[in-house]
Image (spheres, helix red, strand yellow):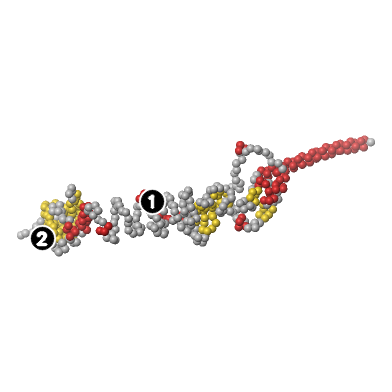
């Protein structure tokens, strides 16, 4: 009596191999499965027949593998290694099913559908496409093209918002103009820290004011790189000045300059638009740690015509100290209190070198050498008092001598009286 054997196959893996040859590429399906015999893993060898069917159960391909080694039910074959699998099967049929027969038995059921792994063989046809065969007209309007190579093109359609990886060397000079850039297309985050920006596209609201070709900034307002609402940096080429300015309420209401660098006159003004001095402050606001004096050159080797001061006490006493208030405190750094000081016209009569005039003709006082005058005045006062003290001491000494002489006469008179 013939023994009835029931075979079953479990698909383990299916993958596509493309083996290169001189003429073309051979398409192979790497197929691995597990065979059981009456429910137990099969060991030994078996003849395996593989066939492909279309969706209508029509057989379109077949091949046989003789004496396939099977261990613990596991076997491995390369489909297409005996009879080539035609590539057109995957282009002509949307669905293909694989049937398997073990030895002389009936084909096992159900058949397994071939999935996308095998259909990927169709992509190999791209290697046989002639150069220039695919034109723009052959591409769908909504197609996405991905390449890891080089694409040469003279133009593109669309806004170009998805373009990446373009470096400066690939952009022709002046090829991107106002027509190609929409307003607001270039933001702060998109500007490289090493960018050399020129033109009025930085802030068009102020571009007519600021022009510079020799400071790295041309026709632009760099305030948008600091704070587009409250700050701006301006280079005024007409006056050769560099301004740091703060905006208030909106970018269109301008406050006075925070700081100005006057290159022409080598001056810096803080809170001053047109500094009159090498350092010009708009307010009575300056401080130094631990000391309220400034260091100056004073080496004897740097000076000539050195002479001692004379009449310093008399000159200082000719100065008249007063208290005063400013008529317009806003022009004097907001100093609206009562302060001690000098009047320039009075000082000018004694120390004319201390008095100068600003650009508006107002007199100013710079107390040059005031500390030296004070020291010498104290010295004169001390010498005067020392002379008075010496004179008084001499008078005291004379009085003491006279007193001793009179005391001697008095003692002699008293002795003579006693003897008589």
* Residue 82 in the image: above or below residue 110: above
Residue 302 screen position, x and y as percent: 61, 38
Residue 62: which disc? none
Disc 2 from disc 1: Cα separation: 75 Å
Q: How crowded is mark 2: few (under 14 residues within 10 Å), some or many (20 or more)?
A: few
Q: Which callout, 2 or 1, points at the residue further toward the start of the chain?
A: 2
According to the picture, the residue beneath numbered tag 2 turns out to be 106
State the SS at label 2. loop
Q: Is residue 377 left or right of residue 409?
A: left
According to the picture, the residue beneath numbered tag 1 turns out to be 173
Residue 182 screen position, x and y as percent: 40, 59
Residue 300 screen position, x and y as percent: 62, 37
Q: Observer-nearest residue: 66 or 384?
A: 384
State the SS at label 1. loop
* Residue 395 in the image: above or below residue 104: above
Residue at 86% from the left image edge and 38% from the top image edge: 406
Q: How crowded is mark 1: few (under 14 residues within 10 Å), some or many (20 or more)?
A: few
Please, which residue is most extreme toward the right here? 420
Residue 206 screen position, x and y as percent: 48, 57
**Quarter of the picture holding the N terminus:** bottom left
Give residue 114's quadrant in the image.
Answer: bottom left
Of marks 2 and 1, the one in the foreground: 1
Can see residue 46? no
**Quarter of the picture holding the C terminus:** top right
Q: Observer-nearest residue: 218 or 86?
A: 218
Residue at 28% from the left image edge and 61% from the top image edge: 141
Q: Observer-nearest residue: 50 or 247?
A: 247
Q: Observer-nearest residue: 358 or 67?
A: 358
Q: Is residue 65 left or right of residue 265?
A: left
Residue at 18% from the left image edge and 47% from the top image edge: 22
Residue at 65% from the left image edge and 44% from the top image edge: 369
Q: Is residue 200 left or right of residue 130?
A: right
């Amino acid at each position: 009596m013939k023994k009835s054997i029931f075979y079953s196959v479990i698909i383990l893996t299916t993958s596509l191999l493309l083996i290169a040859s001189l003429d073309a590429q051979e398409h192979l399906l790497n197929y691995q499965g597990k065979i059981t015999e009456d429910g137990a893993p099969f060991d030994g060898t078996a003849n395996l027949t593989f066939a492909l069917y279309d969706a209508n159960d029509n057989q379109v391909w077949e091949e046989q593998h003789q004496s396939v080694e099977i261990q613990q039910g596991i076997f491995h074959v390369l489909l297409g290694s005996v009879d080539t699998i035609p590539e057109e099967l995957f282009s002509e049929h949307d669905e293909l099913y694989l049937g398997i027969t073990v030895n002389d038995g009936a084909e096992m059921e159900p058949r397994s559908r071939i999935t996308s792994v095998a259909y990927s063989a169709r992509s190999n046809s791209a290697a046989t496409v002639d150069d220039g065969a695919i034109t723009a007209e052959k591409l769908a309007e909504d197609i996405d093209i991905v390449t890891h190579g080089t694409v040469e093109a003279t133009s593109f359609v669309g806004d170009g918002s998805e373009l990446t990886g373009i470096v400066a060397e690939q952009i022709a000079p002046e090829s991107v103009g106002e027509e190609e850039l929409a307003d607001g297309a270039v933001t702060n985050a998109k500007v490289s820290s090493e960018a050399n920006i020129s033109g009025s596209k930085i802030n068009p609201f102020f571009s007519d004011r600021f022009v510079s070709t020799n400071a790295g900034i041309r026709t632009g307002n760099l305030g948008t790189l600091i704070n587009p609402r409250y700050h701006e940096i301006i280079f005024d080429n007409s006056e050769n000045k560099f301004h740091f300015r703060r905006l208030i309420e909106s970018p269109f209401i301008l406050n006075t300059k925070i700081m100005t660098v006057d290159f022409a006159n080598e001056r810096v003004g803080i809170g001053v638009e047109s500094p009159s001095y090498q350092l010009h402050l708009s307010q009575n606001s300056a401080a130094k740690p631990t000391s309220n004096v400034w260091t100056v050159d004073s080496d004897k080797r740097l000076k000539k015509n050195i002479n001692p001061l004379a009449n310093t006490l008399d000159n200082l006493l000719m100065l008249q100290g007063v208290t005063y208030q400013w008529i317009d405190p806003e022009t004097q750094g907001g100093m609206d209190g009562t302060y001690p000081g000098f009047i320039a016209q009075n000082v000018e009569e004694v120390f004319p070198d201390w008095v100068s005039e600003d650009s508006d003709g107002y007199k100013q006082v710079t107390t040059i050498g005031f500390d030296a005058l004070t020291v010498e005045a104290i010295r004169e006062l001390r010498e005067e008092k020392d002379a008075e003290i010496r004179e008084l001491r001499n008078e005291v000494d004379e009085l003491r001598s006279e007193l001793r002489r009179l005391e001697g006469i008095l003692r002699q008179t008293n002795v003579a009286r006693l003897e008589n």
